[in-house]
Image: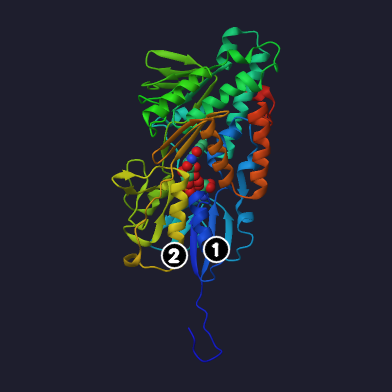
Amino acid sequence: MSLKRGFQIKSTPQQVVIIGAGFGGLNAAKALANSPEFNVLIIDKTNHHLFQPLLYQVATAALSPGDIAMPIREIFRKCDNVKTLMATVNSINRAEKVVILENQQKIAYDYLIVAPGSRHSYFGKDQWESFAPGLKTLQDALHIREMILASFELAERSNDQTLIDKLLSFVIIGAGPTGIEMAGAISEIAHQSLKKNFRSIDPSKTKIYLIEGGSQILNAYPQKLAAYAQHDLEKKRVTVLLNTRVTEVTPEGVGIGSEFIYAHNVIWAAGNTAPSLLNTLDTACDKQGRVLVDSDLSLPVDENVFVIGDSACYQEKGHVLPAIAPVAVQQGRFVGKIIRKKLTKNNRSTFHYVDRGMMANIGKFDALVLSGPLQSSGVFAWFAWCFVHIYFLIGFRTKLFVFIQWIFYFFRGQRNVRLIERPVDLIEKE
Ligand SMILES: Cc1cc2nc3c(=O)[nH]c(=O)nc-3n(C[C@H](O)[C@H](O)[C@H](O)COP(=O)(O)OP(=O)(O)OC[C@H]3O[C@@H](n4cnc5c(N)ncnc54)[C@H](O)[C@@H]3O)c2cc1C
């Protein structure tokens, strides 16, 4: 506001707090970066943005953690108005307009963007988690990588055939994109990468079971593409069990009704639920705990609090938008713009998701692409999958490193990150 010529009163920047630097939070922050009217504070419990779509490649020893994770501070190093705090938000107090950290520190906000993603759902059987870890964080991926690789080592030194069979059996629960990517990759480890590596065991005797409760794998895909993917997985010697409900998970393996599959490795890829932090918003949620947001992605009860990405339940054309990265990215940008323009609720437009399609990788030179009327599978789809994933990775170094690693991985079958960091005796005792 100009008072006299030459004098200006600068208004104090408004404080925007963003919980979570995933696809949603990161893109909201980018939309507000270098906008001096706002101080942006990103709070994340990790110090990095994680490219979850390639997490399964860390879990299966094809990529290193650093290839798919970028320090948040580095991303915003040139944006003076963006600050990063590595901390866990425990609760949100809307009445006081503060978020409360694990150490009870309170942080005030004018605008709040809640983007903490989702976590695994064990459908009320949380005790299964310790025997069937899921894949969400880098820590999860490194744990699963260790489990997979250590199984072959433990089998090599055993004389007990029953134990060897159990160590070389892998069960993946849930045949969505993550489930099929894990199954395809484990098959490639057993049948290609570890070929000629062992002297006592034969890794090609590995058994891989992919269990799905529904009547087709990849239930979001058309039946024809799903059938193609199933056929290819079966060619890779993955046993696909459809219409199969898991009734028990124990350290010995997985119960499916009256049958039991003995397996040392069980991986959970079956479902998501919202983080409990959302309960503290004190607003309506759906059955999965996701927050029901208005058409501008703000809360019906608070126009300055937005929920985006996997944590939000947003309906368009009668369907809830899926928990995928492009939805979170577009919602982050949309909310960032609303705040930047300081729009009040009545002046905000409605969020529309632009659906550019879906992709899933079945293995080397084999993927599915679904984009509008285009349905593609095989080598062409695989090249498209590689291009899109490299394109969306953050940073030139990361793109280059992943590209180089993929040349060795896809063309020579080499998985360069076959590291077990702890003594195998310690792993055996767990
Ligand atoms: C293994 C896997 C594979 C996937 N593959 C694909 C794919 O191929 N294509 C696709 O489109 N989508 C894929 N997705 C889904 C996609 O990654 C998510 O939809 C997307 O990441 C959601 O973005 P988000 O911003 O809502 O949450 P996220 O990206 O999950 O980010 C949430 C952030 O919040 C932080 N956080 C959580 N709680 C707190 C707290 N209390 N305090 C502070 N920080 C917190 C987390 O550390 C994290 O950084 C995949 C997901 C997984 C797990």
Verify CB contact (< 8 Å) between mark 2 and mark 1.
no
Badge 2: residue crowd in 10 Å (few <14, some 14–19, many ≥20):
many
Residue at the spot of label 2: 339
Q: Is residue 198 visible?
A: yes
Q: Is residue 110 visible?
A: no
The x and y percentages for residue 421 are 69, 31
Residue at the spot of label 1: 33
Q: In the image, what residue occupies the spot 51% across and 34% down?
A: 381
Disc 2 residue type?
Ile
Q: Is residue 367 above or below residue 310?
A: above
Report how far apart the C-alphas of labels 2 and 1 lie in the structure. 12 Å
Is residue 23 rendered to the left or right of residue 398?
left
Identify the coloring: rainbow
The x and y percentages for residue 43 are 53, 55
Q: Is residue 112 above or below residue 35?
A: above
Given residues 192 and 110, the one toward you in this image is: 192
Q: In the image, what residue occupies the spot 57% across and 24% down?
A: 186
Q: Is residue 303 above or below residue 420?
A: below
Disc 1 residue type?
Ala
The x and y percentages for residue 341 are 43, 68
The x and y percentages for residue 11 are 50, 77
Q: Which disc is residue 430 wearing?
A: none
Give the SS element for disc 1: loop
| Mark 2 or 1, nearer chain start | 1
Given residues 422 and 297, the one toward you in this image is: 297
